[in-house]
Image (spheres, helix red, strand yellow):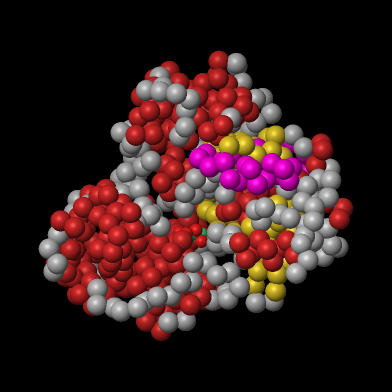
Amino acid sequence: MAEVEGRLSDRTLACLPPAVSRPAYDRSALRTGIVHLGVGAFHRAHQAVCTDEALAEGPPDWGILGVSLRSVATCEALAPQDGLYTLAVRDAGGEQLRVVGALKTVLSAPHARQNLLGAMAAPDTRIVGLTVTEKGYHLDPASRDLDLEAPAVAADLAGRGAPATIYGLIVEALRRRRAAGLAPFTVLSSDNLPDNGKVLRRAMLAFAGARDPGLEKWLADAVAFPSTMVDRITPATTAEDRAAIERSLGLVDAWPVVTEAFSQWVVEDRFPLGRPAWEAGGAVFSSDIAAWERMKLRMLNGAHSALAYLGQLKGCATVDAAVANPEIAELVEGLWRETAETFLAPSDPADYARALMARFRNPTLCHRTAQIAMDGSQKLPGRLLEPLRQRLSTGAPCRHLTAAVAAWMAYVVRQVRAGGAEALDDPLAHTIAQSVLGAGASPASLVAALLSIEAIFGRDLPESEALCTGLVEEIDRLLVIKR
Ligand code: CS2
């Protein structure tokens, strides 16, 4: 096969095949209005695309400075491409390619902390966005309070070295703005946390208060933390995706993003310094984010976690393969029936469930169950344990929610027995592994040991006899599954 020559960049945009859409605005006029922390695939498939649409219709003030908080890989891939990358939208109808231009610059925080802080404190910057995944918030998963003792948070608080966490960076940038007489930027979380804006505000105030009570007061009075619900299924890009996209482009793109056609963004409209006209990209502004967010987090993400763990146990590597398995499909449908009764739905949950199943069946995404299975300790509480708690408190049946939690338990037991803590990709891997290895072999002792991890299950759930009995029955069955 012929080698692709040349690389995607401002200079080569004109060489793209006509079927590939490209930025419909003058990129050389872009100014940085948004600094976005966590420039992974999800941000590039979602908010950056909405911003691209807004830039095509509005002023050039909302270019994005995309920041990798830990790795250098995204920056090394995108900097030579002037921040350009391809979005491949795939469904049964085929694939549509589009080059997105909203990222004006990309940088890697570990190598450019002072530049980053300078950009966050610059007058043009009006929004600091975040997609750093649940663990990037360093919360106690059960209480959702900031863990001031998490090593990275404690290091930032003690001022050891340049700030590295979202708290250290944002609070330092806000301190500089206050000292310079500048209004604060809006802090916009787009992660899958219940009440993401409120929770981030509480954690940020706790951090600022531990550092400087005067700054905490300013933050409390002046900084807006709108809540959001974000949705677009975006699997990690594979080497095969990259090679196929390069062949279609006729140019090298070191880090394209693959996603589905569906995209949804519901945002609370609180941006004191203004915002892009994201409506152009389909964003909806609402004062009631909670209803949207509960439905999405408990139905889409809850089902995702359930099918990922059961899928892993049954040897289903991708989401579409998992939902093709009758037992997994039954679990997902049952979970939806139980969970749909735990929130006030903004639209008909049965329609929402049907649309979700169609999205999960998308055969072109190859969304890996192993990717979704990561970080279970951070994901379970909002997705599965909150609806479970609600139903337990009213005595409502919880068979499917219980089975989903049991699938997580059986999955971690299997991983730990095979490879210890290293076999788990989770910030609480060591705690989970200790519980599993310290428990006896019986299902009852495994359930008791895992349920006693307070950071995940709180103090109340282990006390529910109905839950413990249900979990023991399920685990007993799941642990004998042979792949
Ligand atoms: C998934 C999400 O990996 C996961 O935990 O459940 O990333 C999911 O694909 C997105 O939230 C969809 O909007």
Task: Quarter of the image for the C terminus: give it.
Answer: bottom left
Residue 266 on the magenta span: no
Residue 72 on the magenta span: yes
**Which residue occupies 41% across, 68% down?**
308
Q: Residue 168, can we see it?
A: yes
| The one of 23 and 189 positioned closer to us in this rendering | 23
Task: Quarter of the image for the N terminus: give it.
Answer: bottom right
**Which residue occupies 80% across, 42% down?**
27
Where residue 171 appears, x then y in whole percent? 48, 27
* Label total for image: 0
Residue 387 to residue 102: above or below? below
Q: In this view, does 421 lie to the left or right of 290?
A: left
Where residue 359 appears, x then y in whole percent? 56, 72
Where residue 167 appears, x then y in whole percent? 45, 32
Q: Residue 232, can we see it?
A: no
Residue 373 to residue 157: above or below? below
| The one of 478 and 76 positioned closer to us in this rendering | 76
**Which residue occupies 51% across, 30% down?**
170
Residue 39 to residue 381: above or below? above
Tell which residue pokes out farthest to the bottom in this image: 326
**Which residue occupies 80% across, 52% down?**
6
Residue 397 sits in quarter: bottom left
Q: In this view, does 46 lie to the left or right of 158?
A: right
| The one of 143 and 325 positioned closer to us in this rendering | 325
Residue 3 sits in quarter: bottom right
Q: What stretch is highlighted in magenta?
A: 57-83
Q: In this view, does 450 lie to the left or right of 182?
A: left
Where residue 208 appears, x then y in whole percent? 41, 26
